[in-house]
Amino acid sequence: MYDLANFTKDDMRHCAIKLRNLEERSHSMEETADRIVRYLHENLIDRQTGKSACALVRFFKTHPYGDLSPALQEAAQAILKGRSIIRATKCLTLLATAGDEPYWNARQDSTGHQAIPLIDRDFVYRAPMILQLIQQFGLEVSAVIDTAPTLITKATHKSFNVFHVPEAIGSPHIPAQDQFVLPYKVQSVLGFGGMLPSGNLFAVILFSKVPISLATAGHFKWISAYVRIAVESFDRGNVFAPVPQPIGLSTVR
């Protein structure tokens, strides 16, 4: 386990290797992402309490709207309230979640975050946390939302970076202050990730109950490279885990 408030370089190296190896025996990016968020939620601790330092850990990936399941397409449509979505529109899609509340441990139970359609620049600029995440990652908004091959090629060469809000309380970049930040005593927010070979963005976001320093945030820039290795083999293939079939359901041939 690692004391998140005093996360050392040795912790960084050990954690990175552990996360890198979580793809073993996985059959999809979703399965690997689930292992990643659960490992972080269980092993990043508050040394004073011995409990998880993170109220919530989530793994997001942009994904074309047309390739989402009907349920996720419906979730994206609900956010836009009737506005049309083209198939190529990138959606910031929740692949995995782990947290203190029971309903924070299954992506299907999330309300309003299962698939966020990044329909255009104006939409992103009205979503303060998403905008800050993209900008602090050192990316252009257009590189994240556009499917043009030239932009994708350039984006893949961007270095990994972190999204860091040292003081979450009162921050204009972190929404749901009264509903989430204050009641769950979120002190800092840290995101890390980068671009996958397909040109899609991935991001792991930690909502921490202990303050995260700039030095600690910097360690996660290196960790993000190892997380990318763990998930990139599924980038163009098995992104989502298969939906379990009811027992006893025969196949009609």
Image: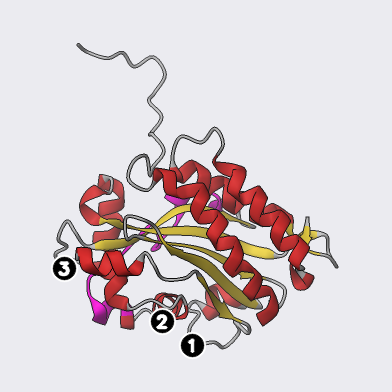
Q: Amino acid at mark 2?
A: Pro
Segment colored magenta? 103-124
Check the picture and name the quadrant holding the N terminus. bottom right
10 Å neighbourhood of mark 3: few (<14), some, or many (≥20)?
few
Q: Earlier in the sequence, mark 1 or mark 2?
A: 2
Question: Amino acid type of disc 3?
Answer: Arg
Task: Give the answer, above or below, for where 43 lies relative to 144.
Answer: above
- Residue shown at the point (59%, 49%) measured from the top left: 20
Q: Is residue 114 left or right of residue 23?
A: left
Q: In which quadrant of the rendered image does the C terminus lie?
A: top left
How far from the left and from the top, in percent, is residue 111?
41, 60
Residue 235 location in percent, x, y?
Answer: 37, 48
User: Which residue in the protein does label 1 denote?
Assistant: 172
The residue at which mark 3 appears reads as: 83
- The x, y position of residue 187, in whole percent, is 66, 78
Q: Nearer the viewer, mark 2 or mark 3?
A: 2
Which residue in the structure is indicated by mark 2? 128
Residue 13's image quarter?
bottom right
Q: Residue furthest right?
A: 48
- The quadrant holding residue 78 is bottom left
Q: Residue at x 30, y 47 (%)?
A: 71
Amino acid type, label 1: Pro
- The CA distance from mark 1 to mark 2 is 7 Å
Say which element carries label 1.
loop
